Image (cartoon, helix red, strand yellow):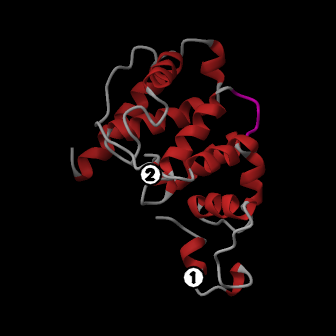
Amino acid sequence: MNGPDRLPYRTTLFAELLAMPAATAQAAADPNRPLLASIVAGQVADSGCLPADLGLGKAVHAALLHTYFPGFDVGGPPRAVEAIPEWEDLQKLLLDFRACEYPSELLVANIVATACAGRDHLWQDLGLANREELSRLMWVNFPALARANTGDMKWKKFLYRQVCSREGIYVCPAPSCGVCKDYAKCFGPEN
């Protein structure tokens, strides 16, 4: 499916996913359910870079669908995602800063780390509808990281910067972001 046809299809899938009753009351009340629905709808509609199993492996992906969207069996396009050497570092960063309120945070951390291999903005690589969904995902799952992004840095750049600073790696030549000539590439809107 190409071009503008993808958006109505994605929107319909998203609505269908949320109309399905979750398998448990805990899953129904999980604030990640609409975010996971958006990610699944995006992947099935061929948005983003995530593989069909969202980077979770077949068994975990099947369990996610069974728990949050029982009966949903529409598969997305088979797509391989580029393996990135920093995947474990990204996953560890996310897990270290997770809210520890919902089991789905573990799934979200793995999905986000996988989407970091994409070449677009992180919200696009996740197949989300917009950056606001990604910001909500970050606040729900990783609130301390979300609070630390005080300058509205683009999320993927922010995560990589956090990983690098943990390792003592500082690749920016400017002494601070405010004086950097590439400021606009790192901060501000991602439309």
- Give the image quarter of residue 159: bottom right
- Of callouts 2 and 1, which one flags the residue occurring earlier in the amino acid sequence? 2
How far across and how far down the image is residue 14, in percent? 42, 33
Residue name at image x 42 percent, y 60 percent: 119
Asked whether 70 falls inside the magenta stretch, the response is no
Q: Which residue is mark 1?
A: 182
Residue drawn at (60%, 12%) of the image: 24
Quarter of the rendering containing residue 106: top right
Point out the residue furthest to the left here: 1
Residue named by callout 2: 125
Which quarter of the figure has residue 78?
top left
Q: Residue at x 68, y 44 (%)?
A: 92
Helix, strand or loop under label 1: loop
When the figure is inspected, residue 136 is found, relative to residue 166, above or below; the finding is: above
Q: Position of residue 123 (x, y in %)?
A: 50, 52
Identify the amino acid type marked 1: Asp
Label the magenta part by its dominant secondary structure: loop
Taking the image as shown, residue 1 lies to the left or right of residue 93, namely: left
Boundaries of the magenta span: 98-102
Q: Nearer the viewer, residue 169 or 96?
A: 169
| Above or below 19: residue 105 | below
